[in-house]
Image: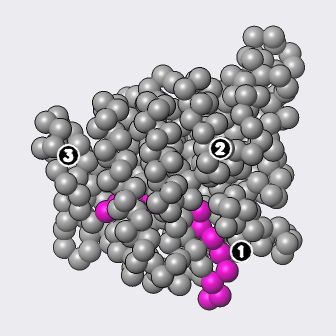
Amino acid sequence: MKRDTIDMHTHFFPREWEDLGKRFGTPDWPSMRHLAGGKAMVMLGEREFRPVYSACWDAGKRLEEMDRDGIDLQVMCSTPVLFAYARPPAQAEYCAQVFNDAALELAAAGNGRLKTLCQVPLQDTDAACRELSRAMRAGHLGVQIGNHVGDRDLDDEGLVTFLQHCAAEGAAVLVHPWDMMGGERTARWMMGWTVSMPAETQLSIVAMILGGAFDRLPRSLRLCFAHGGGSFAFLLGRLENAWHNRDIARGRSEHPPSHYVDRFSVDSAVFDPRALRLLIDVMGEDRVMLGSDYPFPLGELRVGKLIRDMAGLGEGTRAKLLRGNAARFLGL
């Protein structure tokens, strides 16, 4: 298959890393327990968190599967379980340095076909800005952040300050949902991933709009929300109707919600051609780009297939979604 595609949303784990619980003297840090046949289990303390396989840490395996799917370039970022946002800032900054350097080591084995987004200690604005600058100098293309830090959404003053710093550094920003809402009601049947994750992402976009964050941020900021922007595109009409008909639904935004659609992008991880069509209609063909969530089972298992096989998609639009939009977003 011809390699002509950029996948801008993939994840990695290092094959191993130091015992963070031993270093910091506190429990429930992530670690890796290796099993047979290239498989492993990510652990949180003594609790099993997620099964993974060698594509997470083996550049050769990644390249093999990229060739299978016709992927020319892949952008890797850590998995949110590594963020350490609830830890003391100095510990989260140390973790960010460890995993950011590990990402670059993995990318270096990728024959120029693996690129990286860093992580930062987002709970501390100064530390986050400091690590972003260090990581950008080291070779990262930008940063992946969680969609909130505790009760602080992306319109929080400290998080807006960090996003302003990202714009100044020329860093692309991928916003990934994590620490999902719902509690016990969504604990069954992976509903935290299938229900709460899309809601978290929509909440983040709406908080940025109604909280006035986009009105305070420069247009040069390159921002992308994972998983197709969650439920935002489908519910934009509801949000717009509320803004026009109830004063309390306007927040601090200077304009109605639809005004801000050109301020961010989304990836294509929606798994259904009808959903992808709606996404293109709402966001515009320049604001949607291939993102697979590789190499996890809830990601696109044959990367790019949804876009390549979608009927009625013009070839110019298809090319933008498969490569052009991501190249521009990443500054390549």
Closest to the observer: 253 or 221?
221
Instruction: Specify the label residue 20 is tagged with.
Output: 3
For disc 2, the marked residue is 168
Binning the other alpha carbons within 10 Å of mark 3 as few (below 14), some (14 to 19) or many (20 upward) gives some
Quarter of image, res 153: top right
The magenta segment: 1-14
Whole-Å distance between the Cαs marked 3 and 2? 32 Å
Give residue 124's position: percent from left, percent from top: 43, 30
Task: Describe the element under mark 3 as helix, strand or loop.
Answer: helix
Taking the image as shown, residue 81 lies to the left or right of residue 221, namely left
- Horizontal placement of 16 versus 248: left or right? left
Label 2 Cα crowd, 10 Å radius (few <14 / some 14-19 / many 20+) = few
Frontmost of labels 1 and 2 is 2
Q: Reply above or below: 52 against 260.
A: below
Which amino acid, mark 1? Asp
- What is the distance, in whole Å, between disc 1 and disc 2 at their CAs? 38 Å
**Cβ–Cβ under 8 Å for marks 3 and 2:** no
Where the N terminus falls, by quadrant? bottom right
Camera-nearest label, 3 or 2:
2
The location of residue 117, given as percent across then percent down, is 51, 56
Residue 197 visible in the current orientation: yes
- Which residue is drawn at the image coordinates 15% and 43% (left, top)? 23
- The three-letter amino acid code for the residue at tag 2 is Ala
